[in-house]
Amino acid sequence: MLRPLRAEDWDALFAVAADPQIWAGHPMHDRWQEQVFRLFFDDALANRGALAVIEKTSGEIVGSSRFQGYDPADGGSVEIGWTFLARRLWGTGANAEMKRLMLTHALASVERVVFRVGEDNIISRSAMENIGARLTNAIDFTDTPRGPVRHVMYEIDRASFASGLLVNSPSR
């Protein structure tokens, strides 16, 4: 289940994010540290597109994702990203289900959704391919406190999503 992230979600979300293994392959590999995660959390709230991921069976917050970077040009696009989940949910189909919900919502209003993924983040790149996202030729550099990070860009457009190219099988 997804709902807007709230300031009072800090404790529960940081409890998930404090696992260093979640961030091991991520460009911001120290995001498990409280002071680093606090910047991430505050930015998520400030940008007003962040979502808390709630496990239906337990009611627990198990991760987060967000919408950001709406661009009205050419039918419109929005970015989905900044996603992380508790490791116990990796490989269960939870990420694909979350992305399906977010894509359904976004593609009702925009023509395409983009995903910015750290070039060396093999786990996230694999997740993009598993949900049917197409690697584009676009490269983006984002300035971070540790210097620029190179990102590759993936996308899913309304037509490919409507034709069922999104994979959401728990076995993927």
Image (spheres, rainbow, N blue to C red):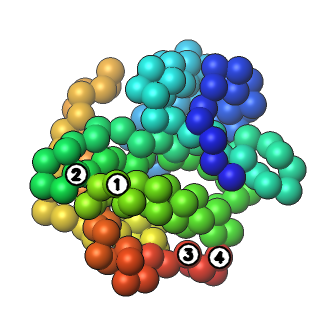
User: Between disc 2 and disc 3, whose residue precedes?
Assistant: 2
Q: Indicate whether 160 appears above or below 104.
A: below
167, 21: nearer the viewer: 167
Tag on residue 170? Answer: 4
Number of numbered discs visible in the structure rendering: 4
- Residue type at mark 2: give it: Gly
> Quick one: 97 or 71, which is closer to the camera?
71
Q: Residue furthest front?
A: 109
Q: Are marks 3 and 4 in contact (CB under 8 Å)?
A: no
* Residue position for label 3: 168
Mark 3 nearby-residue class (10 Å; few <14, some 14–19, many ≥20): some
Mark 3 or mark 1: which is in front? 1
Lower position in the chain sequence, tag 3 or tag 1: 1
Residue 63 lies in quadrant: top right
User: Is residue 86 at all visible to an observer of this figure?
Assistant: no
* 56 over 91 or under it: above or below: above
Disc 3, SS: loop
Q: Position of residue 26 (x, y in %)?
A: 44, 44
Q: Nearer the viewer, mark 2 or mark 3?
A: 2
Residue placed under numbered mark 2 in the picture: 76
Residue type at mark 1 is Ser
Residues marked 3 and 1 touching at CB (< 8 Å): no
User: Residue 124 at what x, y percent from top left?
Assistant: 44, 58
Crowding near pointer 4: few (<14 within 10 Å), some, many (20+)?
few
Residue marked by disc 1: 109
